[in-house]
Every structure is written in structure tokens, then in C-alpha cells.
């Protein structure tokens, strides 16, 4: 039997938003700061401590991305918990993983186990972050609120990068301290998430959802997995192995990207509201194509100078463009048959993009070792072209968009 949805009055909407929105922002800020600390140092960490080759670095992504592939199953297994409680579980897993990395002491086995634990939390938070954000949104301005949420996350990430920069500036690599601080911040975020009370997010969710209506979303998720992993794995690796850049440079680049992102993410959200998901995703594909060419052929400009600054620019712009993921999420929310489909489909999207995320880095590392790193980014350019073609075919009927905008926000 289909239950009728209660009408959400302004008073009810306000009670749902306050104090949940400030709590969510605080928790997200703490997790984002921890993420900034991890992401700016992990590649240098495995290079300095374990001396990995490009092929070995690519292979490491298989265990690191396995929890992402299992995201839909993990969310399904936690179906009895509210979305805010699932987010808390994710935060605790992230914290435990980072504290484990701090204590790994060069042990390969312990590093793998704790890296995977961190990955469980980092991937589990992805779908519920978007779902909670859209639950907190009222009216039709979901893009604006998700943009504001992304802006807070980016600003907090900048704080995390700033801490990395300060710690590394004091001398030494400081990986243990960096992971320790990030782990504590994540555990505190879990406690903040436990304080949230959102009745609308406490409904029992559909465990797994597969619907042909969401086909374009599935395809975009798959292509994003390839694009994302090629850049996350091999973009920094170009700077580390070809141009010999230390961890402190990545902290500085992340701070620049974060500072720009505080302004860019809200503007991106407004652009989605104004121009639509289709155009934004097509623009994103075009810029990613240019970034691929920059990464692949920058060395031809020399070993430093112009080439290095071009790579810095590619790194920063690429970080900013990851925010276009909200366009895919909003597209899904607009075409969703039921509100309850959104969270599990977002989870399934994360799993789908990790099907390719687990294999692409290994293939990319193999290509790097045998044919050179430029060929890796030519492959990424093909993925960008495919993404642009798929985005071109996205359509959201006006009536359905208006109906679902009200339904999903309620």
C-alpha cells in the first residue's frame, strides 16, 4: 500500500532544518578537514615509506576502492539505521582508519587494513551526505543548498591542508601527527552526527533499487569512476614521480583549490539551478578534456617553469570540478519515482563508479610502466568525451521536474 506524503509546512520544515543543518555543517567540516589532511599526504606517504612504482600504486587502488564498490551493500546492510546514523558510522570508521595509519609504523599489512577501514568510512559518507543535504533543502533550490554545503566542506578542507602545511614546514614528514589529528577530528564528527534528529530520514529505506529510468545516472556514475580514479591516482603521481614534488606542495595546491572552491561551489550550485544538469555536465566534460591534455603533454614544455605551473593549474581546476557531482545527484532526484529511491540509488551509483575504479588504476599503472604516462591521460580524454556525449542526452521533463522537486524536498 502506498502511503500518502504529509504536507510539509514552513514551520515543520524549519524544525527539521534547525538545529540539524548547523550540526550537519559542523560534522561535514570536521570530516572534510580530515579528508584534506589525508588526501594531501597519502600519495607522498606511500611513495616515501614504501617506495611504490606506478604499477604498484595503481594496484593499491584495488583494496582502497573495494569499499566503494560495496557501498550499496553496506548501506543495504544498515537499512535499519537512519541516514544520520549511517553517516555517524561512516565518520567513526574514517577516524579509526586514520588513527590506524598513524600507528602503522611502516607495516604494509597494518597500512592495508587501516587504509581499507578509512575507505569504508570515506565511501559510506558519500551517498548519505547528498541524501541528507537534499532532505534538509526546502523548496526547489536544492542546487543552492548543496552548493553551500560543498562550500563549507571545501573551506574546512582548506583548514586541514593548512594544518598539513604547518606541520610539514616544521621539518620532517609528520605523517603520524597528520593522520592522528585527522582521526580525532573524524571521531568528533561522528559524535556530532549522533546528535542530529531528522524524522524524515528515519524511514526504512528500500534496501536496493535498480530501475531502467535511472539508466543515464548509472552510466554517468560508471564514467565518473574512470575519470575520478585516473586523476586521483595518476595526477599527483605525475607531480611526484616526474616533477619530484614533495607533500608540502600538495598541501599548498589543496589550499588554493579550497580557497577558490569556497566561492566556486556555491556558484556551481546556482549554475545547476539556472542552466540545468545537462549543460553543467557537458561543460565539465569539456574542461576535463583540456586537463587531460595538460597532464599528458606538460613535460614537453620542460622539466619546470611553464610545465610545472601548467600542472599546478590542472591539479587545482580538477579539484574544483569534482563538485559537478552534485549535478548528477540533482538529476537523479528530479527523475526519481519515489523519494525513497534516492538514497539507495546514490549508494548504487557509488558502487557502480567503483566497479571501474578498482580496475582502471591497475590498467593505468601497467600502461604507464610500458608506454609512458601520456598514454594514461589520452585514455582519460576518451572517457571525458564519452561523458560529454552521455550528458548531451540527459532530459528532465518539466512537469516531472516540478513534481519531483516538491516530492524529494518534502
Image (cartoon, rainbow, N blue to C red):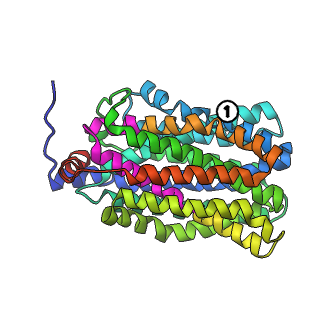
Q: Nearer the viewer, residue 343 or 274?
A: 274
Q: Is residue 286 above or below residue 237?
A: below
* Left or right of residue 308, residue 357 in this image: left
Residue at 25%, 49% in the rendered image: 409
- From this viewpoint, is residue 8 visible? yes
Residue at the spot of label 1: 63
* Left or right of residue 315, residue 214 in this image: left
Q: Nearer the viewer, residue 196 or 343?
A: 343
Residue 269 position within the rendered picture, expressed as x and y whole percent measured from the top left: 39, 62
Dot 1 alpha-carbon crowd within 10 angstroms: few under 14, some 14 to 19, many 20 or more: some
Residue at 36%, 35% in the rendered image: 82
Q: Is residue 333 magenta?
A: yes
Q: Nearer the viewer, residue 47 or 109?
A: 47
Residue 42 position within the rendered picture, expressed as x and y whole percent measured from the top left: 72, 49
The span picked out in magenta is 318-346
Q: Nearer the viewer, residue 352 or 30?
A: 352
Amino acid at each position: 500500500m502506498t502511503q500518502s506524503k504529509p504536507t510539509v509546512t514552513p514551520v515543520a520544515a524549519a524544525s527539521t532544518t534547525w538545529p540539524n543543518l548547523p550540526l550537519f555543517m559542523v560534522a561535514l567540516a570536521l570530516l572534510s578537514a580530515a579528508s584534506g589532511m589525508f588526501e594531501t599526504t597519502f600519495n607522498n606517504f606511500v611513495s616515501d615509506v614504501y617506495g611504490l612504482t606506478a604499477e604498484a600504486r595503481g594496484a593499491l587502488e584495488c583494496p582502497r576502492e573495494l569499499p566503494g564498490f560495496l557501498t550499496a551493500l553496506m548501506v543495504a546492510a544498515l537499512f535499519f539505521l537512519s541516514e544520520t546514523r549511517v553517516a555517524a558510522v561512516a565518520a567513526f570508521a574514517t577516524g579509526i582508519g586514520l588513527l590506524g595509519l598513524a600507528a602503522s609504523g611502516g607495516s604494509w599489512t597494518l597500512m592495508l587494513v587501516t587504509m581499507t577501514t578509512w575507505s569504508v568510512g570515506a565511501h559510506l559518507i558519500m551517498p548519505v551526505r547528498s541524501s541528507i543535504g537534499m532532505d534538509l533543502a526546502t523548496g526547489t533550490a536544492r542546487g543552492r543548498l548543496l552548493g553551500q554545503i560543498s562550500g563549507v566542506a571545501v573551506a574546512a578542507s582548506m583548514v586541514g591542508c593548512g594544518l598539513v602545511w604547518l606541520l610539514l614546514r616544521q621539518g620532517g614528514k609528520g605523517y603520524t601527527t597528520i593522520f592522528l589529528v585527522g582521526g580525532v577530528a573524524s571521531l568528533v564528527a561522528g559524535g556530532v552526527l549522533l546528535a542530529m534528529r531528522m524524522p524524515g530520514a528515519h524511514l526504512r529505506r528500500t534496501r536496493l533499487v535498480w530501475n531502467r529510468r535511472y539508466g543515464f545516472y548509472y552510466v554517468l556514475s560508471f564514467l565518473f569512476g574512470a575519470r575520478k580514479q585516473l586523476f586521483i591516482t595518476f595526477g599527483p603521481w605525475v607531480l611526484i614521480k616526474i616533477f619530484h614534488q614533495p607533500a608540502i606542495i600538495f598541501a599548498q595546491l589543496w589550499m588554493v583549490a579550497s580557497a577558490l572552491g569556497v566561492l566556486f561551489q556555491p556558484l556551481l550550485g546556482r549554475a545547476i539551478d539556472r542552466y540545468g544538469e545537462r549543460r553543467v555536465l557537458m561543460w565539465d566534460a569539456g574542461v576535463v578534456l583540456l586537463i587531460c591534455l595538460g597532464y599528458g603533454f606538460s613535460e614537453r614544455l620542460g622539466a619546470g617553469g611553464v610545465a610545472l605551473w601548467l600542472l599546478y593549474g590542472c591539479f587545482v581546476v580538477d579539484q574544483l570540478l569534482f563538485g559537478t557531482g552534485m549535478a548528477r545527484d540533482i538529476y537523479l532526484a528530479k527523475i526519481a519515482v519515489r523519494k525513497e529511491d534516492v538514497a539507495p540509488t546514490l549508494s548504487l551509483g557509488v558502487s557502480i563508479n567503483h566497479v571501474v575504479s578498482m580496475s582502471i588504476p591497475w590498467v593505468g599503472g601497467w600502461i604507464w610502466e610500458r608506454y609512458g604516462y601520456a598514454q594514461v591521460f589520452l585514455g582519460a580524454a576518451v572517457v571525458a568525451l564519452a561523458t560529454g556525449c552521455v550528458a548531451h542526452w540527459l532530459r528532465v521533463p518539466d512537469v516531472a521536474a516540478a513534481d519531483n522537486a516538491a516530492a524529494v524536498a518534502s
